[in-house]
Image (tube, rainbow, N blue to C red):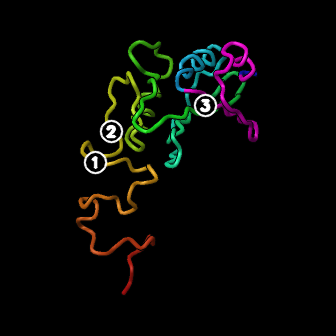
Amino acid sequence: MVIEHIDEQLPGAITDRHDFRGDATIVVAKDDFLKVVDLIFKDGFQLLVDITAVDWPDRAERFDVVYHWLNLATQDRLRIKVPVADGLALPSLVGPDLPPHFKTADWFEREVFDLFGIPFEGHPNLTRLLTWSDFQGHALRKDFPLDGGDPFCMADSTAPYTGQSHPVSE
């Protein structure tokens, strides 16, 4: 299995692991991330399915950046979590010094940057993807205000948000 191979080739790179319903998850330190990615690519995990993040505001390493990989030959899946503190950057998978293995990472990294504020060092175009360029904050952080925090968002609203999908009848 790929996890045992990572343990053999990069001792200590995996800081935690678990398996749920056949999907293996490993936690890797930021400094070992690119080495692990290079190794799993050689082991057949050549499709980067998604990148997302999870916000843990009470932790020192506030975010887990979560990468989902697929081995097309064996159909094995691997999830890699990389803890990162607020304000620190992760290495980009589309940087100019890296082989162009994971072109899908371009938009995935921009999405994580836009919605969580996690920068990716070496990304060639790290700009907002889903929100406008002067949008304040990052909408998927747990401390982002529920009303959007921006008067522009609510400027044409005549009623407060009620949580209902239809207008409030009076």
Q: CA distance from mark 3 to mark 1?
A: 30 Å
Instruction: Give the image location of residue 64, x and y in percent.
Output: 54, 38
Q: Residue at x 39, y 50 (%)?
A: 139
- The residues colored magenta run 3-29
Element on which disc 3 rests: strand
In which quadrant of the rendered view does residue 69 lie? top right
| Kind of residue at disc 2 | Arg
| Kind of residue at disc 1 | Phe
Q: Earlier in the sequence, mark 1 or mark 2?
A: 2
Which residue is under mark 1?
135
Q: Is residue 115 magenta?
A: no
Element on which disc 2 rests: loop
Dot label at residue 109:
none
Q: CA distance from mark 3 to mark 2?
A: 24 Å
Classed neighbour count for the residue bearing mark 2: other residues with Cα under 10 Å, few (<14), some (14–19), many (≥20) = many
Q: Nearer the viewer, residue 96 or 46?
A: 96
